[in-house]
Amino acid sequence: MPDHRARATVSSRRELLAVATLLAVPVAVVPGSAGDPTLVSLWGLVGTGAVGSPFGVDAYPVWTYFADGPRRFGALPRSIRVWPLATAFHLLATISAGGGVAVGREDRRVTGGLLLLAAIASLWVGVGVAGRFGVGAVSGWLTVLPVGAAATLAVAATAYRGDLRAVVGRG
């Protein structure tokens, strides 16, 4: 049965806040052997429980990872090469929703679609990290938590579901 309620034409401030908050949600959480997890964020790696660092946190920005790495970008695993794409999709979704709030111009289908692409890219990064963490073992897949993909899918499903359904002709 079609939904006859009026559909919003632009994102609300609450939806913009939800989309922007995803920029701070870790892509994956990798448990540490001493109980101190490493957070794989859109912006880099954040290690907790670091000895000798302020607040016990050690940050390794993604741009440093790519700039200082011994291998060229094309030689990196695909999941690592997708990492900047995940960041870009999240940023573009935030800009799209922000445009709706700031100037009243947005295509919510684009914002929702960017969130879906961000979720897929984030999941790809998380699965890649899990494969390296568990050295291909099933235990590695079950240990790394892909919180970024789950959170991004949740925002897309709750805020932009009707707009995404309209894309496939079901809205």
Image: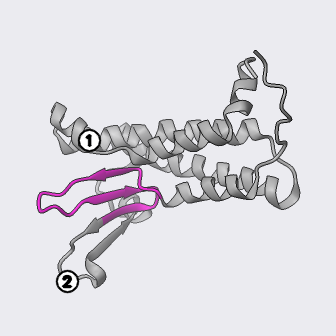
Residue 84 on the magenta segment: no
Q: Which image quarter is the C terminus in? A: top right
Q: Look at mark 1 in the image and give the residue it sits on.
A: 130
Q: Residues within 10 Å of mark 2 (few under 14, many from 20)?
A: few
Residue type pointed to by label 1: Ala
Q: Look at mark 2 in the image and give the residue it sits on.
A: 52
Question: SS class of the residue under badge 2?
Answer: loop
Dot 1 and dot 2 residues touching (CB under 8 Å)? no
Choose top left, top right, bottom left or bottom right for residue 102.
Answer: bottom right
User: Residue at horizontal 58%, vertical 50%?
Assistant: 90
Residue 10 located left or right of residue 145: right
Q: Residue furthest left?
A: 34
User: Residue at horizontal 16%, vertical 38%?
Assistant: 135
Q: Give the magenta-colored segment's residue range.
A: 25-46
Task: Give above or below for 50 relative to 27.
Answer: below
Residue 38 on the magenta segment: yes
Q: CA distance from mark 1 to mark 2?
A: 27 Å
Q: Residues within 10 Å of mark 1 (few under 14, many from 20)?
A: many
Question: SS class of the residue under badge 1?
Answer: helix
User: Residue at horizontal 80%, vertical 41%?
Assistant: 107
Q: Which image quarter is the N terminus in? A: top right
Choose top left, top right, bottom left or bottom right for residue 37.
Answer: bottom left
Q: Say which label, 1 or 2, has the lower sequence index.
A: 2
